[in-house]
Image: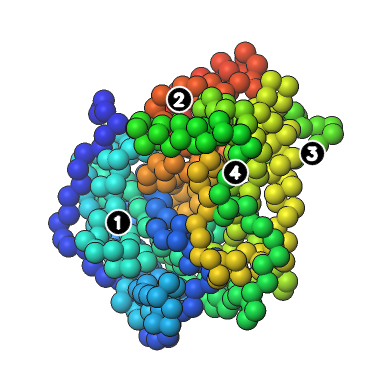
Amino acid sequence: MFESSEIPDSYYKNEPSLVRPGNPTPSRTLYLSNLDDQKFLRFSIKYIYLYKKSVSIESLKSSLSKVLVHYYPLAGRLRTSAEDEGKLEVDCNGEGALFAEAFMDFTVDEFLEVSMRPNRSWRKLLYKVDARNFLDIPPLVIQVTHLNGGGMILCTAINHCLCDGIGTSQFLKAWAHLTSKSDDILPISPFHDRHVLKPSSIPKITFTHPEYTNTTTPHHEGINGIHFLDQMLKSQSLVPVSLTFKPSHILNLRRHCVPSLKCTSFEALASHTWRSWIRSLSLPESLKVKLLFSVNVRMTMKPELPSGYYGNGFVLGCAETTVKDLVGSNKNIRHGVKLVQEAKAVITEDYVRSMIDYLEERRVKPDLSMSLVISQWAKLGLEDLDFGEGKPMHMGPLASEIYCLFLPVAGDLDGIRVLMSVPEKIAEKFEYYMKDFMGREEKEEAKEWHREDIQTF
């Protein structure tokens, strides 16, 4: 067995190829909404899947060619709009998705031993495109890595400007469906047009949108706090922390909010993670801190966004408070939960329309200076992706980012794995606070989860 978390190098027998749509597709320019075309989304969402048994490359390429007929923008290329150099659009030219096939002297069981915490060596599981800039990278890049003993690792990189988490899940499920089923009928037909989220002809900015405005502090020590955190993030290496919360532990968190305040699993775990993160940093009490989290607005809009809409149909909710009010000695997760609920309640159709107009005028990035960002992957069905040889034994991000991810747990629909990279100096403290709500028996059980996680994820 490999003692290090590093994985061996993969090798390629052939150069990557372009997989094009199997039938003619519309030659058009796809407009991207202001929710799509945000500067902080100009990257690819990179998923990794581990399978016990390989699926033939010919079958995967054939079904990919079929599904790209339906999702033809993913076979196109991003470019700058001729009318507005600040905006991106998609040239639906059918150029194709990049598909690489690799081999690695590694087994499924060996990968499972190192799969709990992503590390830099995992990047070799996705073909590195030789590109001058972001626009030169195909919107869809795929690598299948064959393992010893017949297993495989599937990595996908899907441009975030074209799809959000729900959209990527919809596309991947469509590809898996056409691989494992004999018929060509998709469970959900994709809806391409983004004009439903077009800005107003006369901008109507009716909200303040704190998710994009800089954090302000009432006292001078807040400035020192921002400087302290900035220096910490730049000077220390980040290490991934991964904790699995079983349904019983999430229920225990939620019990801290009743009877006076009821909450969802996400609200409780988001508040708890935010508090634990801030507590571990030992920041000045007067410093203002934010929690940014994705909120699906497909059903918020009137009329609702069409079924099959796979573009970015989310906005960022923003909870904001001071360090003292969030983690003071007499506080618990209830305060954070209430802030999360209030942030969600603000997001109405009028709020989303105001945000779209705000981005049309200012094209700003979210304020990340004192923010924790949580992205919800746990309820997208990503862990069920079956290409005909069974569900994945592991699913997660290809790389560990500074954003916090709520990930699905294989075999446990209600479990959630929290993955987050933190400065090395505070990693143990962050883990301690994340487990601090538990009793002695639960903490002992948590140690068992941690040992099991290394074996089973």
Q: Are marks 1 and 3 in contact (CB under 8 Å)?
A: no
- Residue mark closest to the camera, 1 vs 4: 4
Which residue corresponds to the image point at 37% horizontal and 46% vertical from the top-left? 398
- Give, as a three-letter code, the residue at label 3: Lys
Mark 4 lies on residue: 216
- Do we see residue 176 in this rendering? no
The mark nearer the N terminus, 1 or 4, is 1
Indicate whether 126 appears above or below 423. below
Residue nearest the observer in this picture, 426 or 311: 426
To which residue does mark 2 refer?
A: 426
Q: Is residue 404 visible?
A: yes
Do labels 2 and 4 touch, CB within 8 Å?
no
Q: Which mark is residue 143?
A: 1
Element on which disc 3 rests: loop
Q: Position of residue 319 (x, y in %)?
A: 65, 44
Q: Which residue is mark 3?
A: 262
Task: Give the CA distance from mark 3 to mark 2.
Answer: 31 Å
Residue 258: % across, % down: 81, 32
Say if mark 1 contacts mark 4, CB within 8 Å.
Answer: no
Tag 2, which secondary structure?
helix
